[in-house]
Image (spheres, rainbow, N blue to C red):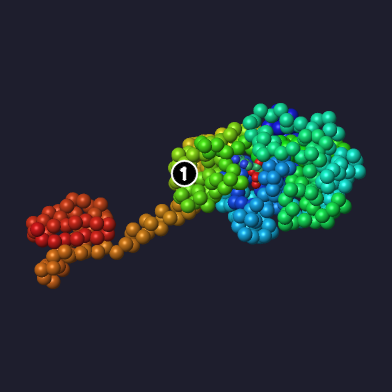
């Protein structure tokens, strides 16, 4: 598989350190608010990548952190802890906020068909590991104590700006937002590994450390969690493009300084989802959530399809019009699959299966071209082969795409059958709207109306029309409704 690698700025062949196995790390959410659908774009694309790697036969172990401490309001170590801000906003404790938004995040993931990573680690559960890694960095001379904090010394590295030359405008966000100079730093790009001094004395969560009571910097968590769970040779590291700098650059600095060799060989970055008016921001509180999409009548999987229809390395502009057309496309796709016969017992057409599957894998092998992979679904529907083969292919592709296609089609088929049955069973009612009609007339007219209805059902329209004429001759006027006929005298 060819996959763009931010490290080499090339579409590299994806090769793992140990053949057949893949270690994959994902930067998890900062749980001080709901995830916005921009964050979730990154997690959807990472989920597709993970599932495709599994689909190709790799034994993937995926680990993700949950940032519940240390992420300051600027990625460049300034400002207040985001968790504390969240807690204050909602008059709760930091841990209550963390628990609530972690659960909310996984609930959103489930709705979007995103699999939970094999290993999920909240940062607050790994404080001893962070301390050990910081001690190693101090021992090896890559870190220093200054003004009560421990800093990473970026001047000790030859190639600190690993992702520095990327063209994506998003890249510099971390350092642009709210830059404040920290006089204790030796170099501008140095970053905090452990805080004991900050302007915000009311930091709620603090731990003992060899350098005093304090809390970890944001970057150290991913290095420590990844090294502990996935070892010294990481095959794949993922995140949104804003994470590339400074967060991932700093992760590389810490991890490689500690282990003394190349850490991660392949970096996967998802470009941002933006709105027409610009970026979505959790901290400003102006953002779209999965719940909002649902309230507006869009199934979460429609948003997943919206994301899959564009390439992960292109910025994606969200629009309600785009969601509308994706919703229509999704419904049509499901309807076409529902029209296939699940009871078809023909043998799977091996030739057609292989050819159509190749279209799907060619698309995915080409730097995860999910929009072409979705097109491969339409190719299956158009193909000249039996329904059994088509359904087998769709189920196969959906192991990766996770659009719930087979289940949705089954539901659509069952609903159609149920409504047909309901129609067949519906009680046919004759309503007399003439209060002066006597019982004999009522009985005669009702019998004729019922006979006419029977003729219509049997598609004997000549007979139905003849009965209508007969009734009309008797001065009876009919008003047809759904399962009702109302009559009166003219
Ligand atoms: P956070 O919860 O802020 O730590 O971010 C969680 C993930 O979402 C990270 O991988 C970010 O890089 C990513 N992310 C943030 N904003 C966007 C966006 N607008 N579009 C896509 N991914 C994003
Ligand atoms: Zn990270």
The quarter of the picture where the N terminus appears is top right
The quarter of the picture where the C terminus appears is bottom left
The picture quadrant where one finds residue 140 is: top right
Residue at screen point 71% across, 39% down: 180
> Seen from this angle, which residue lies furthest bottom?
439
Against 102, residue 52 (above or below) is above
Disc 1 on helix, strand or loop?
helix
Residue at screen point 80% across, 45% down: 193
Is residue 446 visible in the rendered image? The answer is yes
The x, y position of residue 377, in whole percent, is 53, 39
The x, y position of residue 69, in whole percent, is 72, 52
Residue at screen point 17% across, 65% down: 432
Residue at screen point 13% across, 61% down: 488
Quadrant position of ligand 1? top right
Q: How many marks?
A: 1
Residue where numbered disc 1 is placed: 327
The x, y position of residue 161, in whole percent, is 76, 31
Is residue 224 visible in the rendered image? The answer is no
The x, y position of residue 115, in whole percent, is 64, 50
The picture quadrant where one finds residue 246 is: top right
């Amino acid at each position: 598989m060819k996959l763009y690698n931010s490290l080499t700025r090339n579409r590299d062949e994806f090769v793992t350190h140990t053949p057949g196995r893949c270690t994959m790390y994902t930067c998890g959410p900062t749980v001080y608010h709901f995830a916005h659908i921009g964050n979730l774009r990154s997690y959807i694309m990472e989920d597709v990548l993970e599932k495709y790697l599994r689909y190709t036969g790799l034994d993937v172990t995926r680990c993700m952190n949950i940032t519940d401490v240390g992420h300051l309001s600027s990625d460049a170590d300034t400002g207040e802890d985001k968790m504390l801000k969240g807690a204050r906003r909602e008059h709760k404790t930091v841990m209550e906020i963390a628990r609530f938004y972690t659960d909310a995040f996984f609930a959103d993931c489930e709705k979007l068909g995103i699999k939970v990573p094999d290993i999920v680690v909240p940062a607050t559960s790994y404080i001893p590991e962070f301390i050990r890694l910081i001690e190693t960095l101090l021992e090896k001379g890559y870190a220093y104590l200054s003004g009560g904090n421990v800093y990473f010394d970026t001047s000790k590295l030859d190639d600190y700006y690993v992702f520095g030359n990327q063209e994506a405008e998003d890249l510099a966000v971390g350092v642009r937002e709210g830059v404040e100079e920290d006089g204790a730093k030796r170099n501008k790009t140095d970053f905090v590994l452990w805080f004991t001094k900050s302007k915000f004395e009311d930091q709620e969560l603090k731990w003992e450390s060899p350098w005093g009571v304090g809390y970890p910097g944001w970057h150290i968590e991913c290095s420590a969690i990844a090294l502990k769970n996935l070892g010294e040779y990481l095959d794949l590291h993922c995140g949104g493009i804003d994470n590339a700098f400074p967060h991932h650059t700093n992760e590389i600095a810490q991890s490689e300084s500690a282990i003394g060799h190349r850490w991660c060989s392949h970096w996967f970055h998802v470009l941002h989802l933006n709105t027409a008016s610009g970026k979505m921001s959790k901290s400003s509180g102006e953002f779209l959530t999965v719940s909002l999409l649902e309230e507006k009548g869009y199934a979460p999987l429609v948003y997943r399809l919206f994301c899959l229809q564009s390439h992960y390395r292109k910025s994606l502009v969200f629009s309600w019009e785009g969601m509308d057309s994706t919703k229509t496309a999704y419904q049509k796709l499901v309807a076409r699959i529902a029209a296939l016969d699940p009871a078809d017992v023909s043998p799977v057409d091996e030739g057609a299966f292989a050819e159509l599957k190749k279209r799907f894998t060619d698309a995915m092998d080409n730097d995860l071209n999910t929009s072409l992979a979705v097109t491969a679904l339409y190719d299956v529907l158009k193909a000249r082969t039996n329904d059994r083969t088509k359904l087998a292919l769709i189920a196969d592709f959906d192991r990766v795409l996770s659009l719930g296609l087979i289940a949705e089609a089954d539901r659509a088929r069952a609903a159609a059958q149920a409504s047909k049955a309901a129609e067949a069973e519906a009680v046919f009612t004759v309503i007399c709207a003439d209060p002066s009609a006597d019982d004999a007339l009522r009985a005669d007219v009702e019998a004729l109306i019922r006979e006419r209805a029977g003729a219509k059902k049997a598609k004997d329209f000549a007979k139905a029309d003849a009965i209508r004429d007969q009734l009309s001759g008797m001065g009876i006027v009919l008003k047809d409704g759904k399962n009702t006929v109302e009559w009166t005298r003219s």
